[in-house]
Structures are given as C-alpha cells and as structure tokens.
Amino acid sequence: MSKNRSSKQQNRDRRKAKRASRGESNVVPLFPQSMTTPSSLIPAGFQEWVSTELFSADEVSVDGFTAQLEILLQAVAGVHPEFDATAWTMDDVEAMGSFLEFMIEKESIPVDQARVIAYAGMTLSRFLTEHGRWAGDPDAPAFAQDRLPAAVGLMMGTTEIGPVDEDAERAALMATEPLARITVLLGWLGDGRPTTPNRWLKPAAARELAQALGLEMPAGRTSMSNFAPLRHLWLYAQAMGLIKVNTVRATPVVSAAEWEAAPVQAPRNALTNWIDSMFPEDVDTEFSAQFYESLAAIIMAGCTNYANTRADIDGWVEKLGYSEVLVRALHARLASCIEEGWLTLEADTYVVPEALRPAVLPAIPQLGQMQAANDDALFTDAPIDGDLHVRIELDGVSPPVWRLLVVNSLTTLTEFHDVLQTVFDWENSHLHQFIAGGRRWMDERALTGDGRGDLHSEYDVMVGDILRAPGAQMIYEYDFGDGWSHLITVSDIKPAPDERHPEVLDGAGMAPLEDVGGPPGWEDFVAAVSDPRHPDHAERRSWAGLAPGQSFDPTAFDLAAVNRQLRRLF
C-alpha cells in the first residue's frame, strides 16, 4: 500500500475507533500524527498521563502530541535560559504566545499545527495543576489558557462538559431539526410502508412523507432519492438502526413512542452521528483540510466560555492569512448548523447550547486529523470566489439538450450533483461521477477500500476548485449503464452576491427518460413515440406513461418550472 493510501486508512481507522468509544469520555482530544523521542523538557509522568487520558494508549498519537509540545518548550528555553517546564512565569507564557504568532506570520508552520502546539501547552499546564506539581507563577496557568489559543486565532477554553439536567438535554435534543424529523418519520411509518426495488419509498408515499415533514417536494419528482432532505433523512434513519428497509417494505425498528421515551443516550448518539457525518473521513485538498479544521475549532470553542464571534473569524483573514473565500464558506456552513438547531448565534457569537454539548463534542474531529492525505494534492489554492456561468450539454443526444446555469463557486460537488439531477430531471437512481484533470470524484458511499489512485470522494471538493477560469471544463457522468455524459463548460465568472441560489438562465430540449438505453435508446424512443405508424409506437408510449392523445415534444423545455424546483431544493 502506498504512503498516501496508508495515511488515508490510518485516518479512517482513528475516526472509526473514536466513533466506537463515544459516550465514554467527555473530553475531546486534539493531536497531530507524527513521531519523535520525548525530551528532558517534558515533565516526568506527562506522556503516560496523556496516553491514558487522551489517546487510549495510541503510541503514535502520544508521540506526535509530545513532539508538538517539545517545539513550544524548546522555543521558550531558547529565549529564557532559566526556563523550568514545571514553573512557568508570566513572561514564559507571553514568550509562548509570541513564538506562535511569529511562526504563523512567517508561515514557518501551518496554522493547524500551531493550534495543536498551543493546545499541547495548555494541556501541560492543566496536567501540572491537577497533579499538584505546579511550581511557577500562580496566575500563569489561567493566563496560558487565554494567551495560547488567542495566539493561533482561537479562544478555546476547556472542552470538558459540565453537568447537564437529563430532562433539559432530552428536550433540547428532540427539538433539533434532525431528531424532530426522525420522530415524524417513525410516527408516519406506523406498521410499515411499501418501497421500490431500490429500497426507496414509492413516489406517492415519499410525497406524503415530505408533506408530513413540512417539506415541499418538487413537482414531477418521482424518486425521494433525488430530493436531498428526504434522501439524507432516510439514509440517516437506516444508519442509526431506527428503521429497517428491504425491497418490499420499510418498517420502524422502534415506534415513535419508544423513540421519545428512550434513554437520553439514544437521542444523544443520534445527534452525535448526524454532526459527525458533516466531517469527511479524509480530505484531498489543502483548502478543505483548513476549512474542516477551522470548523471543528469554532464548534469546539462554542462549547466553552471563549466562543468565537463573527468578527473573530473575519479577523483570521488578516491575522492568520486565511482567504476571504474560506471565511465566507465557514459562515455559510455555520448558518446551516444554526438552522439544524444545535448551534446558536448569540450576540454575534457562535455558541453550542449547554444541553447539547454532550452530543456535539464527541462528533468533532481531533485537531490535526483533517489533513490533506495526498502529498500531490490536485488543489493547493482556495477555490475561486464568484458565480460561475456554465453551459451544460448532454453529449450525443438529438434533439440537443443543454442548460445555461449560474452556480456559486463554493458549491460542493455533492450539492452540484443534486443541482444537476434537478436541472435534467433525473431520478438519482444510479451511480454518478465527476471527471476533470485525470481525476474522478464520486459519492463517498460508493467508494470501497482505497479504490483507484484517481478516484476520490466528492464530499469536500468545491466546484470552484475545478472550474477556475472561463473555458474550464469537467464531465458529469450519470448512470454508467445508459452512459449519460454531461459536458460542463465555464462561459463566465462574475462577482457573487451574498445570497444566491443556483438558477437556470436558458436551455433547450427535454431531458431523456431514465433507463431508456442511453443516447441511442433515446433516439429510438423519440422516433417511435413521434410516429404513429412506428411498430413500437403504442408500446413505447405506454412504457413512458403517456396518456392517449397526450402530446410529446422532445424539444420542450420549461425554464420557470426548473427554477421553481431549484428553489425548493435549496
């Protein structure tokens, strides 16, 4: 196995182990992954304590964490020859903060590594204080808890969870959007509902469920797999073991009443897993690594008395050299967390409600984990910032089928897939992939093992990572059996307004029907349905569900209807 693939697998294994141990610890460990030999500057007993308290005897993680602490201690010893690692002065702490700020300013170390170094220093001061071994200035530990995270653009404080009233926690959990929808789903399922061979609800039932959830399913949508809110809820409920689905029927494993009366650990774990799914197991771009590291740090800080304000995060552009695109993307993702009900914006500050912290903290990745796994990552710069005007043409189809679409550059490929499914009226019942620059991206669930070297998860890649200039192209392939190939070409890039959803500006041609047999099959279908004298005319009209006398125009395209569906999607 290559070095890159081994690194990815180690990341996956660490996160799987972390998921398996949820509920056993209320402290979120932070660590990078590197190895070194402990120095004499590391106080005796600290490495053993870290191994037990933070890393469950994971030798690689322990060695990596102490290696980052060693960097900090050696830096202070270099300017304060009398420095004692168990007896910090206020000047020592200030030197630590100044060192981190200097290293970030000079780009000598990545910001993410600086944050881990800062946390290592905070952890050492905690260890010395808790074990009665602190011999320095009595005010230095508290100063370190403020000065070190501030130096790396955070105000983190402690991430230990205080006591939470169980009834208050249950009420707060069940009020979040994901869990409230689970309650509705279980009640609506009753004794069971019929499903398709692909294990989705039948179209009429899917529309009924959407109505029960207060969602407006786009007209003409025949599969819940092509309606993101229903699709995510359905897969989430199955992954949590709350419903059982086969090719005939879906049934609840627990009733709505049992779900609402379950021990608080059940809804707590459910929300933990929902939030965890927001973070990919590994990332392929430096921008995405920085994005998810920062997102995790903001949410973690929101569980403390040192939560980040919007102004704090905006200030990272100047203080830490973050791109404005990254900061905008962070605010947008945080807004979606607020909509889901487990994050709040209080006095312009991102705060996790105390009653939800036992569920939120275990879901947050460890700092240093969200590192780009490929040394030769395709994307090293931030995605471009703006609205992309793209022409999307279905290859090999006659009459021509094309759409002129405006989409924001920060749209992920996963979101772009939903947009394309809507724009071309597909049903999301087959696999898909994006292709550009000799690489391919697919739904993370479709990836098995390490796959091939050119195949990656689409989850954390943005459209603006790939399409960076007018004339840039990529291909979207859908249904590998029928082989629908969509050629996507950038025609223009314009400044993006604060709020802009995808919009189709123009287009032509009716999108082909699912499972018609690809471009050749569609051509045969159009010929048969359009000619009453064709021997397959009646059979093909019946297969397509066309009523007697109903017109069929392969050149038809309803711009207003498509945009209504896009607005419902977002």
Image: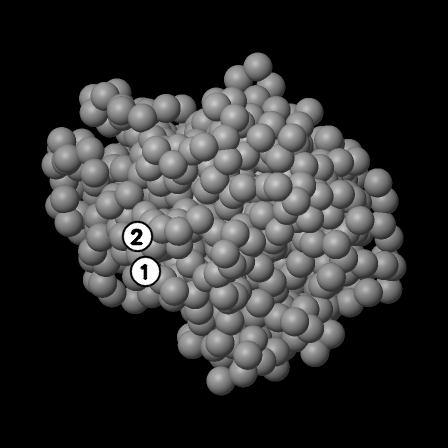
Residue density around tag 1, few if under 14, some if 14–19, many if 20 or more, within 10 Å = some
From the viewer's perspective, is 306 left or right of 50? right
Residue 202: assigned label: none
Residue density around tag 2, few if under 14, some if 14–19, many if 20 or more, within 10 Å = few
From the viewer's perspective, is 37 left or right of 320? left
User: Dots 2 and 1: beta carbons under 8 Å?
Assistant: yes
> Residue drawn 54% across and 83% down?
2
Instruction: Return the residue at label 2.
Output: 52
> Residue drawn 42% across and 76% down?
449
Q: Residue 146: image x %, image y %?
A: 56, 27
Residue 197 lies in what quarter of the image? bottom left
User: Is any part of residue 69 visible from this angle?
Assistant: yes
How many discs mark residues in the rendered view? Answer: 2
Residue 57: assigned label: 1
Label 1 sits on a secondary structure element that is: loop
User: Is any part of residue 239 visible from this angle?
Assistant: no
* Farthest residue, direction top: 347
From the viewer's perspective, is 236 left or right of 43? left
> Residue drawn 14% across and 44% down?
254
Give 108 or 535, whichever is nearer the viewer: 108
